[in-house]
Amino acid sequence: AQSVTQLDSHVSVSEGTPVLLRCNYSSSYSPSLFWYVQHPNKGLQLLLKYTSAATLVKGINGFEAEFKKSETSFHLTKPSAHMSDAAEYFCVVSDKGNAGNMLTFGGGTRLMVKP
Amino acid sequence: DGGITQSPKYLFRKEGQNVTLSCEQNLNHDAMYWYRQDPGQGLRLIYYSQIVNDFQKGDIAEGYSVSREKKESFPLTVTSAQKNPTAFYLCASSPEGLGNTEAFFGQGTRLTVV
């Protein structure tokens, strides 16, 4: 079985300061990992994905994440927050070893950006 | 433009009524999914379909039904058996049903029971 834990339900940062959204996962096999962003009353947009290539993954809007197998983590970072980054962020795991597997979502982290 | 279209954006249902949420994709994806999102929570899988004329229950299928008669379409019916249907519903699709690739999401339908 696979699971995803987003360690913070809310994160608040000031505009221009770094962003760190934490995600830990458990998986029986070699996982694929994703970060999605959701703005209010909207669908989910893919930020970035890890699929067993480079462990440091760069995504859209200046976000990046590092896959650390030893720590079973996939934390999302951005050097400098922008007001438009305020949204809900979801860490998602997909287990390649399980035929018919679906994506498993974390509970989400709401990012607030203060001016 | 390729994408996933959900309609309507807002839907109101009276107690005891069935309602159907539409989901159409022109991405030529084999797999389609329905998720339910409640305030402050992650997404929970209702139903999924990996191929036309086949679908499987997800984690919270009770009170819902689906059909997959065409590759492009995966409508969700919320039946009167669903006791707490007020939620945000998201449809998604992916090129493969094994979950190795990312899912592409529609803009969602907000269902409210009145």
Image (cartoon, coloured by chain):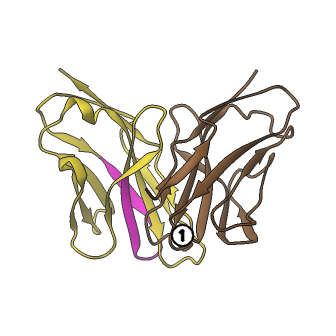
B2 horizontally vs B85: left or right = left
- Residue at x 41% of width, y 71% of height: A31
SS at mark 1 in the image: loop
Chain A's shade in the image?
yellow
Residue A79 in the image: above or below residue A12: below
Chain B's shade in the image?
brown
Residue A12 image-quadrant placement: top left
Residue A34 image-quadrant placement: bottom left
Residue A14 in the image: above or below residue B72: above
> From the image, which quarter does the N terminus of chain A lie in?
bottom right
State yes or no: residue A24 in magenta.
yes
Q: Which span of residues is magenta-colored?
A: A22-35
Mark 1 residue type: Asn
- Residue at x 50% of width, y 79% of height: A97
Q: Chain of mark 1?
A: B
A108 horizontally vs A70: left or right = right
A40 horizontally vs B38: left or right = left
Q: Which residue is mark 1?
A: B28
- Chief SS of the magenta region: strand
Task: Find residue B73 and report its horizontal and vertical position in percent.
Answer: 66, 59
A92 horizontally vs B20: left or right = left
State yes or no: residue A17 in magenta.
no
User: B24 or A99, which is in the foreground?
Assistant: B24
